[in-house]
Amino acid sequence: MDQAKNFTKGFIRENPVFILMLGLCPALGTTTSAFNGMGMGLATMFVVLMSNIVVSLIKNFVPNKVRIPCYIVIIASFVTIVDLVMAGFMPALHEQLGLFIPLIVVNCFVLGRAEAFASKNTLLSSVIDGTGMGLGFTFALTLLGAAREILGSNAIFGLQFIEGDGMLVFILAPGAFIALGYLIALANKLNKQ
Amino acid sequence: MAKRESTFFNMVLALLTVTLVASASLGFIYELTREPIEMARAARKNNAIRAVVPDFDNNPTEERYTIEAAGGELVFYPAKKDGELVGTAVETFTNRGFSGTIRLMVGLLPDGTIHGIEVLEHKETPGLGDKMESDKSDFSAQFEGQNPEDFRLRLRQDGGDVDGITATTISSRAYCEAVQLAFDLYMDKDADVSYELPSRDEAVERVLADFANNPLQEDFLVMANGNEHTVFPGRRGRRYTGLAVDIYSEAGYIGPIRLMVGFDSEGVITGIEVLGHEETPGYGDLIENARSDFYKQFIGLNPGEDNIRLKEDGGIIDNISGATITARAYCEAVRSAWDIFRQAENR
Amino acid sequence: MEYIVIVLSAILVNNIVLAQFLGLCPFFGVSSRISTAAGMGGAVLFVMTVAAIVTYLISHYILIPFDLIYLRTITYILVISSLVQMVEIILKKVSPPLYQALGIFLPLMTTNCAILGVAILVIQNEYTLMSGVVFAVAHSIGFTLALVILAGIREQLELVNVPEGMKGNPIILVAAGLLALAFMGFAGIV
């Protein structure tokens, strides 16, 4: 398999959020700013990467019938690790992301990578796949966060570039849906070309 | 290695291994992160306290007390410098925000003047209600230096002195309400104040200076002056390091005063906690550790050598003004505790 | 009174899908027909309530007493996935018609973050068991409401001439956004 292609597929062609419509809950729930989106993306990337590595290593040890419970336990462990480490060392971000950190465990995209890719491929491919897909997810969340922050609070990564309030609706729930809708339309257009 | 068959044995083995490794490593990570998590939590609260009161050098969290009101409880963090109260950070709340509970930390100077306010928690609309946060607008700045005694904590449209946040009347109104509640309870000394006294078990751990055992499980009874008293020995290994004595005096102004007095192995007082009393609010209740430094003058004294009596009775203890009888009873209890300490020594 | 506040808040003000962004996968995945949307809603109601009760008991009688809160995520997700399997098996035996109606939705339940999310929220909000059950039922009603409304909109959308670039997911997301905007009107009623 072409590893370069394997790595870049997560950005646009098979982007988990824009194309596959997976992991939408954190994608909408945590992207009130570019920074929050990036934090959530990186946390998820860590879980995808680590669970891909472990699943790929033990794929032959685990019998077929119990593979899903095993994968879930592995993913849940890494999620808990992220949760604990963030609470200890990045308390402000941890509070912002809140409920969505434990919910990484039910992010269909994470289990999807373990089941569809890591359980069938070599360690190296799984590492590259996990990193690429994780970065693609981070990219999507940061982009969505940035779009909402620019429109909603006239700022990017906390830096205000126009005085005063932006279009508040983009920070609120409805704006999340609408912003993502237009970004998906954009990604579709890019994919067609 | 070929893929394993889905036999019963293989399935159980795989599941068991995976869960064992997972929970063991999680336990390990939990131990590693426990301290940073606790520190981060404490730091958050301390930062809020630091932001709203003048410079202090004590640990306000350790000396906090609570008052129940409005269906919840307010926490008071006294900030002291050189033993003198310089301000109190009050953790107050209201359930009348636009989207639910708002929690504030209000810093009050001893006379009730507002020194600063920080928002601890709210769910108000981003871009509107969240302007109550001090870094998002000047709304909270208008309270600084104002004394609610003559600064009416109501919005201008409600006949008060507060400029509300545009388009956010409900949030602004709730904010004022929470500040008012903090002020009222702080100033109202006669309110039904239930300062949280330590439980007996907490007190034992606080008054003993050095121990590695669980003194609560090794308690025994000592007879003294015709009464039985419970004592809790502190040990490190087999070495005896001190004793906590549960003692009371009947000579209080209104009723009995119950103390927990801690000694080291030499008989030097290592700590005192008030377990219960019925003394007058504002006067006799100053014997409580959270309310004054009265107890501190006992620490380091040895009742065998030092005269544990009020100065007017020929001793070395400073009185509490307006509460002589209470202070005298307190000294008496400490002296009886020492008698019990000596009795227990002989065992 | 407390229950009324919980119910109104869960269904209208803090709608689980439109305000809290939980359960979005089924929200977009199974909302093409009103009838399937209602079926999914029924399955969620059932699983969410049972899951909330079971995880509540596990938290209060195992995790908290033994100071094992850090195993919460891992235990909850295992309990929920085995619960879903069990419900599927029992339903198949006990009530074939109900299984016919809900069966195909059950396997989707494990990765529905609304279930795990509500289970965690019940513990975080320090509810009693009864309030927790009311909370779970109300949230699943809120979920069903949002799902059925969106399905209704999507059935209408099929008849409309949508601009080329917005066809498919983008227009559905924008419609969901407008729906969320409408629900924001309920803010402040409790």
Image (cartoon, rainbow, N blue to C red):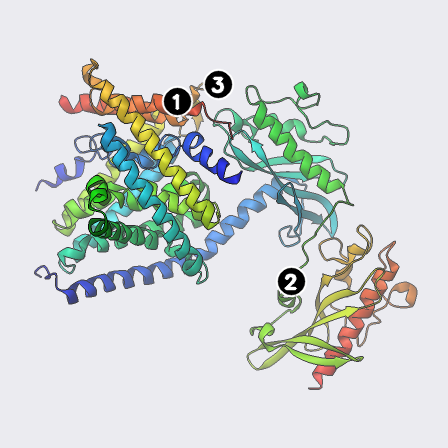
User: Which image quadrant for residue B212?
Assistant: bottom right
**Element carrying mark 1:** helix
Report the amino acid beneath label 3.
Glu
Q: Is residue A183 above or below residue C26?
A: above
Name the residue tied to disc 3.
A163
User: Is residue B299 something that shows in the picture?
Assistant: no
Q: Chain of mark 2?
A: B
Secondary-structure class at tag 3: loop
Query: Are discs 2 and 3 less than 8 Å apart at CB?
Result: no
> In this rendering, which labeled residue sits more in front, label 1 or label 3?
1
Q: Quadrant of the C terminus of chain A?
A: top left
Residue type (three-letter) at the residue carrying disc 1: Leu
Between the residue at mark 1 and the residue at mark 2, the CA separation in whole angstroms equals 51 Å
Foreground pick, A112 / B279: B279
Q: Please check whether the numbered discs 1 and 3 fall on a single chain.
A: no
* Residue C154 place in picture, x, y as percent: 24, 23
Q: Give the letter of the chain under mark 3.
A: A
| Residue C75 appears in view | yes
Judging by the rendered image, the residue that carries numbered circle 1 is C181
Q: Which residue is mark 2?
A: B199
Tag 2 secondary structure: loop
Residue at horizontal 73%, vertical 61%? B276
- Are marks 1 and 2 in one subunit? no
For the residue pair B253 and A89, the one nearer the viewer reads as: B253
Image quadrant in which you'd find residue A44: top left
**Residue count near mark 2 (Cα–Cα under 10 Å), binned few <14, some 14–19, many ≥20:** few
Q: Is residue B21 left or right of residue B137?
A: left
Q: Quadrant of residue A27?
A: top left
Q: Find residue B185 and report its horizontal and vertical position in percent.
A: 71, 41
Comparing B250 with A102, the one in front is B250
